[in-house]
Image (tube, rainbow, N blue to C red):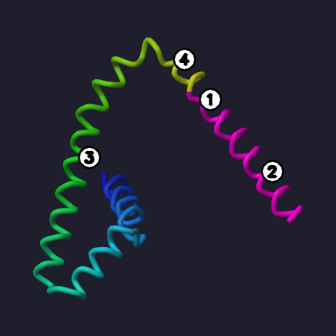
Amino acid sequence: MTAALVAGLVAGYGIAVPVGAVATLLVSLTARTSLRTGACAALGVATADGLYALLATLGGAALADALRPVLVPLRWASALVLAALAVRGAVAAVRHHRRDRHT
């Protein structure tokens, strides 16, 4: 049990430590206003994240059971969408490269 707790703590810190856009916004907000405002904003962000996690946990299990019969077609559809995005990106990159090369 201790190993699972330590692994969970390490994973949690690995997710929480990197500074992203929201953390930068919170630091900027706190610097421009007050510690109280920044702390309240951070509490709001943490509450929203917790609610999203709760929704994903409760709804994800129910959704997984509902999607089980159509799992294979969904996998193929997602693979096709990803392949189409890759082809579109490659075509756009080649066009951009050729246009810049000729000017």
> Measuring 17% from the left and 70% from the top, which residue is drawn there?
41
> Measuring 30% from the left and 28% from the top, which residue is drawn there?
61
The residue singled out by tag 1 in the image is 79
Question: Is 23 on the left-hand or right-hand side of 78?
Answer: left
For the residue labelled by badge 3, is the local secondary structure a helix, a strand or a loop? helix
The residue singled out by tag 4 in the image is 72
Q: Is residue 29 magenta?
A: no
Magenta part, dominant SS: helix
Mark closer to the chain start, 3 or 2: 3
Q: Closer to us: mark 2 or mark 1?
A: 2
Please say if 84 is above or below 76.
below
Please say if 50 is above or below 103.
above
Query: Magenta segment range?
Result: 78-103
Q: CA distance from mark 2 to mark 1?
A: 22 Å
Mark closer to the chain start, 4 or 2: 4
Q: Quadrant of residue 48?
A: bottom left
For the residue labelled by badge 4, is the local secondary structure a helix, a strand or a loop? helix
The residue singled out by tag 2 in the image is 94
Q: Residues within 10 Å of mark 3 (few under 14, many from 20)?
A: few
